[in-house]
Amino acid sequence: MARLARIAAFFLVAVAGFSPLAGAQAALLLEQPYGIYGILNPTGHNAIYFQRICTVSPVKLRRCRPGELGSVISRYEGIDGYDWVAMPLVPYLYAVERANQVPARVTRRQVVAMRDRYRETHFEAMGLDRSGGSWVPDGWTQLVGAAYQRRIYAFRFNTTPEQDDEVIARLNSEPNHSHFHMLSRNCADFARTVLDIYFPHRFHRSFFPDVGITTPKQMTDKLARYARHHPELDLKVFEIPQIPGFRHFSQQNKDVAESFLTTAYVIPITLISPYITGGLFVDYIARGRYRLIHHHPQVLGPDNLAELMEPESTPQNLRILATSGPAAATNVSESSSDAESVSPASVSSTPSAAAPVQAGASE
């Protein structure tokens, strides 16, 4: 009997080792700036997607169960006083519950209707649609429909169950109260803190580049540089394109020095102190000129979003996403006349193989 028990235990361990959740990925999301604010502050946004981490609620985490698609977590301002909020992947990108509800093209009225419907169903009960005294109005809109307002690049890397469990334990145990500060406690600082859980003592604040400010482009570059020396991370980059119609297309991410030197900010700064301009120029030349995406990355849309996950689990998760078929436009607006029934294939080009990231090259 003891021998049979040992054999059974070995079999269970082996099955667990080959289960879809035994190996998993996370992805640092580099989200482009958009609109007037994106012109004033063209650094963009960082969030992190976790294949193995799901939600009890938007502010309480747990391990994903088989068939669940993970979550996106980031730091925000104006979400009822919370520091970070976790969202399921499909609603975060497209403001709907299922991939087959994603239109290939949207109008402003459609996006407002989809966001309001999701807010009423999921946010009102716990107050996530309140600003919590913040100066940011309607901060909750940052949580749903990100792909309608900007292009997103996902830098995917391997994780272990122990690393993911540590992230869950840390975020669940620490106070989740907002102390957002643009210069010292922003979304990229949150990404830096989480990446430091996965890779201790590797991600820290740097004075060069970005004069000590943590930026999304800087954090992504640090991850790419670290992965170059650690091939076991198997870092891949994917593009999640912006769905057209809601906003003008988003702009390229810039670091601090690049933001000042390539915009009208350079004129008043030079008038105040040419030395500051010179210092920013040196910072940009020495450390700020790096290109994160050297090749055309694989394009992910609603119909192939599961390819963001680790390869062994992709067939299963593709079946989950495909329960309603490919993502054609559906009645997601107040009036069906607002929807444009276009195949999602028109949103993205034919995907090529995911491109490995190379970092540190000059533009």
Image (spheres, rainbow, N blue to C red):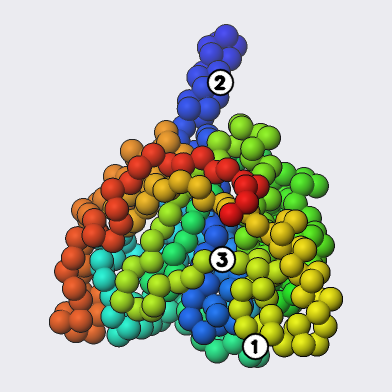
- Residue beneath disc 2: 9
Q: Nearer the viewer, mark 3 or mark 1?
A: 3
- Residue beneath disc 1: 134
Residue 171 sits in which quadrant? bottom right
Residue 255 sits in which quadrant? bottom right
Of residue 298 and residue 257, the one placed in the foreground of this image is 257
Quote the CA–CA distance across marks 2 and 1: 53 Å
Q: Amino acid at mark 1?
A: Ser
Of residue 209 and residue 346, the one placed in the foreground of this image is 209
Q: Nearer the viewer, mark 3 or mark 2?
A: 3
Quadrant where the N terminus is found in the figure: top right
Q: Residue at x 37, y 52 (%)?
A: 300
The numbered mark, 2 or 1, whose residue comes first in the sequence reads 2
Q: Are marks 3 and 2 in contact (CB under 8 Å)?
A: no
Left or right: 76, with 247 as reference point: right
- Residue beneath disc 3: 253
Q: Is residue 214 visible?
A: no
Q: Does residue 155 lie above or below 284 as drawn?
A: above
Q: Amino acid at mark 2?
A: Ala
